[in-house]
Image (cartoon, rainbow, N blue to C red):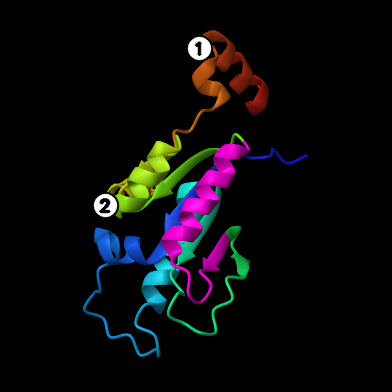
Amino acid sequence: MAHKRNKLLIVDGYNVLRSGKRYKRNTDPDYTDDPYNAARERLLTDVVNFAGHEYKAIIVFDGAYNEFSTGEAQTIGGVRIIFSPAGQSADKVIEKLAHDARERNVETLVVTSDATIQDTVFGQGVDRMSADGFSHEVAQYYDEVRLDESPRVARKNTIAERIDSATLAKLKALRDGK
């Protein structure tokens, strides 16, 4: 049976994309209609890796000025993605999610560099991390993974290396028919 996670990670999507060093626009041209697509995908991948098996994760993007935004969530890679509903800021959605989680005694971490959100959620007993702090943590994670995957020469561990020389000589004699 899967272990139920009782930790929640809430990421202020556009704030992290604008503030986090990992998400600054690179020099590669982006030929999609939305210049944030590649950055959003990279953020989603980073959140999936950061959350791992420890956190349930939610990324909240601001949809306040999009008249078609309903605030309906969708799940991608185990991460809930929410665009705030038209007329409501992502800040309010984040604050409500953090408040509700704390009411249910869920350990919560909010990733944002927005000082107002940080102050509001910290007052509720919620942990917070800056966008740059998140960028740094994710970069460090990828560095560790890269180092773990670097090729190594496997040590050959044979029986001949683990037994005494007299026994090895007897085994060789048996093998060779002597």
Q: Is residue 80 visible?
A: yes
Does the magenta portion include 103? yes
**Number of other residues with Cα within 10 Å of mark 1, as a class: few under 14, some 14 to 19, many 20 or more:** few
What residue is rendered at 50% in x and 84% in y?
67
Picture quadrant of residue 40: bottom left
Front-lying residue, 149 or 76: 76
Q: Count the marks: how many? A: 2
What residue is rendered at 25% in x and 74% in y?
25
Does the magenta portion include 11? no
The residue pinned by badge 1 equals 165
**Number of other residues with Cα within 10 Å of mark 2, as a class: few under 14, some 14 to 19, many 20 or more:** some
| Mark 1 or mark 2, whichever is nearer to me | 2
Is the residue 120 above or below the residue 71 in the image? above
Is the residue 66 above or below the residue 90 in the image? below
Front-lying residue, 18 or 38: 18
Is the residue 67 above or below the residue 99 in the image? below
Instruction: Name the side, left or right, on which 106 lies relative to 117.
Output: right
Picture quadrant of residue 22: bottom left
Q: Is residue 49 visible?
A: no
Relative image position of residue 53 (x, y in whole percent): 58, 43
At label 2, the amino acid type is Asp
Front-lying residue, 87 or 148: 87
| Residue range corresponding to the magenta coloring | 80-104
Q: CA distance from mark 1 to mark 2?
A: 59 Å
At label 1, the amino acid type is Ser
Relative image position of residue 70 (x, y in whole percent): 59, 76
Disc number at residue 132? Answer: 2
Picture quadrant of residue 69: bottom right
